[in-house]
Every structure is written in C-alpha cells, then in structure tokens.
C-alpha cells in the first residue's frame, strides 16, 4: 500500500530544536524521526522506525549468514544473576535499579550476558550441543551522567548483542572470527567507514577485545593508529617501555631549595636557574595523588609517578583502577595524610622512602612505564619548598607496581614497533570480546566433554549499537537542507511529490505511486491537496528519501521530473521512462 503523506504521522520543524548539539540530533527531530521525552530518552516516530528496521534487517541477515540464531530477553531483569557475576556493584551509578511491590530487586539491563548464560545452562548439557551463537536486538538502559548528542549517547538505546558458546578455546577463536567478519560485512553494507582497534574489556571482562570505531570529529572515543597498521583505543594503548639505563655513574640524589615551585612549570624554571644543566618538564617526576573508592565503599589513596610533561588521562585511569572509582585526592585527604606534602611529593628522602606499601605512609606508590630502572628525575623531596635532583629509579626509590594512566600523544611509539602513532576521534559502533569462562564459571554453565568430564563453557560477546549507527549515518548523510539517506536504509525507496495545482498533477502522481508500489518499491506519496509546492519540496529535502519523483506542470503531457536528492540533479522525463529508471 502506498503511504500517503496526508495521512502519515509526521510534522516537520523549520528551526533547530533547543539543546540539540550535533547535526544528526537536530535533523532527526526536525524531520520527524524522533521526539525527545527526557534527557537521553526519545520516542520513535514512523519515519525513524522504518530506518531503524532497515538497519536491523541488514544486521539480522549477516547474523544468520554467520550462523547465529535470534532470541529475545526482557529488559527488566532480576538482581540475582548480576549479583553472582559482581556486576550489580561494578556498574555503580550507571545501573537503573528498581524494586517490585514485594521488595524484590530488579534492574533495567545494560547488557544481557547473565541472561544468555543462564538460558544455555538451562537447555544444554553436552559438548555435542556446541558451538552455539545466539543474539537479540533489544533496548538497553544506562544512567549516563551526561547524555549528549541525541542518539549518539543516550540513556535508552537499541543494541544487537550476540553471544557464542564453545567447549574449547579453539572453538571460541573460530566463533569470534565469524562474528568479527560479519561485523565487517554489516558496516560495509551500511556504508560506514570503520577502524578496528584493540580495546579494554571494562566491566565485561574477558581477554581479546576489539572495537569497531567510526572516525568522526564528534566521536567520544580517542584512538591511536600507526602507518604500520597498529590501532588501539587510548584506554588499551600500552607504552613502549624504555630499556634499563646504567646508573653506575649517577651522582647521589641531592635536595635543593625550591621555594614557590608547586607546579612543573615553576619547578623547571627554578631548576634551570639554580642547577647545572638544562631541564625540561620531561626530566621531572610528577607525583599525582588519586583516591580510589572500592566496591565495598572503602577509600584508598595511591600516588602515581608520571613524567612531568604528561597529564593524567581520566579514561585510562578509570580502566587502570577498575572496578574502583577514581578521583583526584581532596584537601581533606591531604589533611588526613600529613606526610604527603602537597606540591612537593616525591618517592625519596634522605631518611628513606616515604611512599609505598612498606613505607611510613603505607600508601601504594605506582609509576608510569617510562619510569624504568636507571632513569633520573627531578622530583619532590617530601619537604615543603624543597625538591631533589639526580633521583634514580631502582636505586633511590622502588615502585609497588606499574600503571598506565598518562595521556597518549601524537608521535608516541606504537608498542608493536610499527612506528609513531597519531591520535584521532571516533565513535564506537561495534565491540567484540572473548569473554572466556568468567560468566560460565560464575553462573555454573558446564557441559560434558568427550571424556564425560564437566568443563566450563567458554564464551564470546559481540555488540552493535543500532540506534547509534542510525545517528552516525544521519551525521554523514546530510546537507544544509536536510537528510539524504543511503538507499540501503532510507525510510522509503521513492518519494513522489504532486507539485502541480491542477487535478492532472494529482492524477498522474497517484498513477505513478501505484505503479512503483506494484514493482515492490516502498513509496511515500505527498498527496496533500492544499500545501504549496515550496513546502512539499522543503519537506522532501528535510526527510531525505534519496530519489524523488516530482509531478508538476507537465503532468497533462505525461512529463515528470526525476530528482536525485544527493546530487541535486533534476531531469525531465516521460513518466514511463522515469518509472523504468526507478525500477531498474
């Protein structure tokens, strides 16, 4: 049946909605695809649902081709399974929690590993049942602190999540690659550029983890890549560790007066004025005090030594200390730990180490990988208004561990030796994990192997952000007049516009819409009788169906106009020729 605009649930807007930040957010609301309900929450209108369904069709076809079968879980899930895997606490404030009338705890699922695991546990018991891959397309919920950019970062969003189940690690590798290959086909069919990067698994757990990022300036993720082929999310980037340095000729560590030098900039300027040699920020060791909040609510201070020319990357710090929360130490933290001399903290003093688990403070002291054995530093002396120079790692101080929290910069060497990296922005559109046996062991998913022995199943998890992909496609396909959808996901195949004022235009447009529909095309017909051609053209530009058939002044002579929305080209044709072109 032809969809008639006179009866279609659609109202377009001429002005950008208040609060809309990025192009996709503005145009999807203006063109009548979505409507905001609350911060990060949207209602889906008929046009939006049609595009969303077409994206889901591509995903379902490629999931089927990869051997996956579709299931569907409720969004509302009980607490118990998530508590068994530790994620009831790990997700923290991101989780929407609620209780039923009897006081039972539930959540709106941010993801469904537990549900998938328990379903397979309930139904399968032998290695002969495996391998198995099942998936769903379902709404997810995360209480984002700062939902932004429309569908790009919301509190309710649609995801495709698939899970593979194998009895061996070799089987997991095969299932993982089948899904990874399917993702490449999906994104290629949707016309999305992507970069596959190494990633951190985060609260999901597991070993191998890769993200599919779409490079875009509005992306919320920073990633690095080298000309030699290395690519990683900054959270997963590992620093190339310098070789140990011979420090047999290093002078003894020496304290010097450094009044009013609590910052790296002031310290460098003072050191160059009073010490021999030329110093830069890279020669200084900055000691950052962080406060960790663990899942049981306990608060722990740690000090991390990083080169003074680097800053702390908050995302890398979150990953490094997960599942604990991370924040900068407060004034109260310093008051409670008087041995930490603010602005002059260091890992060494003449009286012995004051940092470290075995030290006077009992505070763990961690260092950046660049603070390797034999490296020499200018750093705090743990005395107010004093620093020390020639402080050698591995001689004058020792760390409790190494941690990656310093920012990554253009030109840093890739850890695989493939050359310097460059930073870029991207938006995550897919993520594949090798979960391993974490969830199977937590929830007791075991099968009998070939020898009749119970073994834990090994799992993979594979997610695609459906609504995020829709927004990214909109972000990529527009001009100053509106959306221009790729044909593969457009809400309709053809938009027929009756642009004339006499009845002949409407009669021919009606005939054209019917004939196009008979060929299997989905047709949106603008049959509104008292709407001007200018308004109709404006709506056609805003809505963004890529092929438009305009029936206007030449209708009585059988002449129509074929309008390519992407190129802007308009071509006058006989009706039969236009229909032949559209159905070719």
Image (cartoon, grey):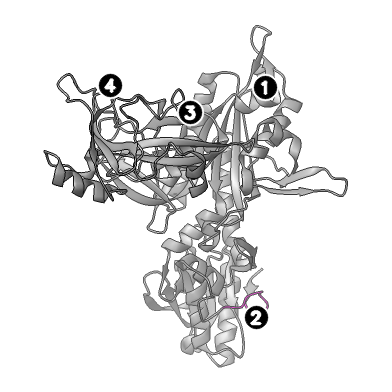
**Closer to us: 416 or 350:** 350
In the depicted structure, whether residue 330 falls above or below residue 80: below
Sequence-wise, which precedes: disc 1 or disc 2?
2
Please state if 148 lies on the left or on the right of 386 as rendered: right
At label 1, counting other C-alpha atoms closer than 10 Å, the crowd grade (few under 14, some 14-19, many 20 or more) is: some
Q: Return the x and y of residue 465 as percentages of the image width and height.
A: 54, 49
Q: Distance between the Cα atoms at labels 1 and 3?
A: 52 Å
In magenta, the rendered stretch is: 5-12
Q: Give the numbered dot on residue 6.
A: 2
In front: label 1 or label 2: 1
Mark 2 and mark 3: span between their CA atoms? Answer: 74 Å
- The CA distance from mark 1 to mark 2 is 53 Å
Q: Which x, y percent locates residue 539?
A: 52, 79
For the stretch drawn in magenta, the main secondary structure is loop
Residue that numbered label 4 is attached to: 395
Q: Nearer the viewer, mark 2 or mark 4?
A: 4
First in sequence: mark 1 vs mark 4? 1
Determine the residue positioned at 62% across, 68% down.
36
| Circle 3 SS class | loop
Classed neighbour count for the residue bearing mark 3: other residues with Cα under 10 Å, few (<14), some (14–19), many (≥20): few
Residue 455 figure quarter:
top right
- Residue 12 place in picture, x, y as percent: 57, 78
Query: Secondary structure beneath disc 1?
Result: helix
Q: Which residue is mark 1?
A: 129
> Disc 3 marks which residue?
362
Residue lying at the far bottom in this picture: please name it.
Answer: 502
- Which image quarter is the N terminus in? bottom right
Q: Earlier in the sequence, mark 2 or mark 3?
A: 2
């Amino acid at each position: 049946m032809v969809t008639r605009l006179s009866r279609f649930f659609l109202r377009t807007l001429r002005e950008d909605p208040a609060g809309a930040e990025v192009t996709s957010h503005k145009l999807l609301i203006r063109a009548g695809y979505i409507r905001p309900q609350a911060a990060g929450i949207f209602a889906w209108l008929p046009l939006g649902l049609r595009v969303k369904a077409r994206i889901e069709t591509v995903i379902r076809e490629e999931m089927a081709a990869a051997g996956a079968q579709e299931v569907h879980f409720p969004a509302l899930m009980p607490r118990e399974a998530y508590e068994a895997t530790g994620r009831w606490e790990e997700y923290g404030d991101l989780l929407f929690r609620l209780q039923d009338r009897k006081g039972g705890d539930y959540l709106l699922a941010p993801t469904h590993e537990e549900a998938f695991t328990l379903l397979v546990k309930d139904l399968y018991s032998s290695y002969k049942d495996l391998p198995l891959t099942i998936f769903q397309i379902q709404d997810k919920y995360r209480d984002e602190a700062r939902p932004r950019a429309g569908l790009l970062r919301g509190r309710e969003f649609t995801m495709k999540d698939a899970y593979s189940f194998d009895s061996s690690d070799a089987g997991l590798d095969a299932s993982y690659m089948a899904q990874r290959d399917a993702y490449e086909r999906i994104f290629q069919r949707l016309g999305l550029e992507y970069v596959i990067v190494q990633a951190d698994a985060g609260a999901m757990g597991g070993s191998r983890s890769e993200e599919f990022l779409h490079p875009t300036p509005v992306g919320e993720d920073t990633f690095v890549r080298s000309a030699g082929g290395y690519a990683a999310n900054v959270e997963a980037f590992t620093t190339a560790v310098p070789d140990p340095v011979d420090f047999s000729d290093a002078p003894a560590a020496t304290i010097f007066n450094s009044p009013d030098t609590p910052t790296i900039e002031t310290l460098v300027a003072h050191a160059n004025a009073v010490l021999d040699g030329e110093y830069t920020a890279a020669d200084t060791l900055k000691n950052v005090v962080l406060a960790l909040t663990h899942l049981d609510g306990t608060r722990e201070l740690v000090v991390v030594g990083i080169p003074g020319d680097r800053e702390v990357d908050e995302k890398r710090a979150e990953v490094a200390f997960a599942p604990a929360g991370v924040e900068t130490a407060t004034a109260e933290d310093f008051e409670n730990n008087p041995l930490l001399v603010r602005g002059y903290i260091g890992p060494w003093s003449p009286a012995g180490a004051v940092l470290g688990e075995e030290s006077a403070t009992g505070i763990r002291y961690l260092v950046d990988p660049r603070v390797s054995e034999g490296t020499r530093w200018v750093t705090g002396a743990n005395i107010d208004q004093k620093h020390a120079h020639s402080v050698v790692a591995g001689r004058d101080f020792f760390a409790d561990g190494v941690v990656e929290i310093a920012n990554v910069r253009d030109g840093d060497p890739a850890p695989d030796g493939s050359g310097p990296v460059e930073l870029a922005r991207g938006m995550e559109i897919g993520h594949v994990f090798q979960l391993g046996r974490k969830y199977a062991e937590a929830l007791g998913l075991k099968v009998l192997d070939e020898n009749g022995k119970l073994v834990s199943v090994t799992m993979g998890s594979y997610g695609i952000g459906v609504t995020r992909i829709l927004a990214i496609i909109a972000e990529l396909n527009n001009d100053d007049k509106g959306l221009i959808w790729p044909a593969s996901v457009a809400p309709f195949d053809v938009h027929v516009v009756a642009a004339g004022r006499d009845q002949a235009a409407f009669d021919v447009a009606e005939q054209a819409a019917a004939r196009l529909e008979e060929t299997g095309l989905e047709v949106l017909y603008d049959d509104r009788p008292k709407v001007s051609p200018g308004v109709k053209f404006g709506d056609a530009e805003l809505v963004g169906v890529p092929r438009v058939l305009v029936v206007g002044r030449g209708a009585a002579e059988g002449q129509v106009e074929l309008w390519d929305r992407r190129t802007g080209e308009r071509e006058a044709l006989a009706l039969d020729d236009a229909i032949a072109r559209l159905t070719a």
